[in-house]
Amino acid sequence: MNKPIIGIAATQLDEYVEELYNSQVHYAQGELVEAIRAAGGIPLILPIGIPIEAVEYVSHIDKLILAGGHDVDPMTYDEEPHPLAGSLVPKRDFFEIELVHEMRRQKKPIMSICRGTQLLNIALGGTVWQDLSLRPEETTVKHNQAPTRSDVVTHSVFVEEDSELAKIIGENILVNSFHHQAIHKVGHGLRAVAWSHDEVIEALEGENILAVQWHPELAFKTNENDFEIFKHFIKDM
Ligand code: MN
């Protein structure tokens, strides 16, 4: 059987770093490339494009992974930037939103990680909290574990019994965590299926969609659950 081609939507260096290099750099994380390969897929990095190109890119891949990175531009969900919001790469956001729509049109599976999950939720009509502190619930779990190593799992997550995710990794898991924003209103066709102790949504699913708030690509070598997620996405979705 041919290995599936897994598109990875690239990110871009911050502008001040590009000024240092005097060059533009589109890139994907090496760990994500490695995780896809280890799980039996062919990783293919898609540069940040213009939205009209999405149809061509999507026709060349079997599945798409939306990776972590910058905050999503709050304009994409009709909010002003809150003072606690982070830095943005709007052209990545607009391209990835069109990739999501085109993947839905072509009925191909999407997996998303951290910011990728927030972007996917927004593309499907949802919103995010621009900072965890803006939620009505008190944030009592450390959701940005830095400087703890990224392959160390630090907080627990409860997975809904009646979910696809629970079939893959069970109902009580540990995850790494590197986010300061969180899913607020859940997008169309998605449902929340996992939460941290302080009620942050940690995973969403929908038809052909597997979306997590943590970083399985950074811990898949040491944490079996995280490798199972990649294997499920690449082999079974
Ligand atoms: Mn978390």
Image: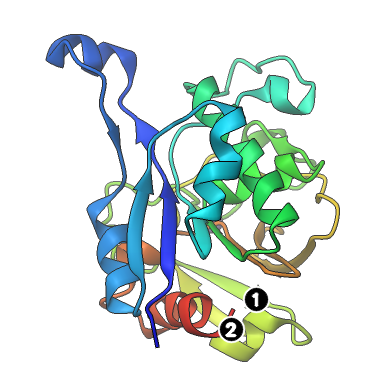
Location of residue 226 by image quarter: bottom left
Name the one closer to the observer, 199 or 1: 1
Q: Is residue 105 above or below residue 237?
A: above
Q: Amino acid at mark 1?
A: Phe
* x then y, percent, for residue 201: 69, 58
Q: Which residue is mark 1?
A: 158
* Residue found farthest to the right: 188
Q: Position of residue 15 (x, y in %)?
A: 32, 14
Relative to 197, 180 lies left or right: left
- Give SS at disc 1: strand
Image: 21 above or below 43: above
Give the residue at mark 2: 172
**Image quadrant where residue 192 sits:** bottom right
Residue at the image point whose x is 31% and y is 45% from the top: 28
Residue type at numbered disc 2: Asn
Where does the N terminus fall, quadrant-wise? bottom left
Residue located at (60% from left, 51% from top): 117
Do residues under tags 2 and 1 come within 8 Å of each other at their CB atoms?
yes
Q: Position of residue 236 (x, y in %)?
A: 55, 85
Looking at the picture, how far across and down is residue 95, in whole percent? Answer: 56, 32
| Vertical side of 136 occupied by 166: above or below | below
Q: Is residue 33 visible in the rendered structure shown here?
A: yes
Residue closer to the observer: 77 or 80: 77
For marks 2 and 1, give the CA distance: 5 Å
Residue furthest to the left in view is 21
Q: Residues within 10 Å of mark 1 (few under 14, many from 20)?
A: many
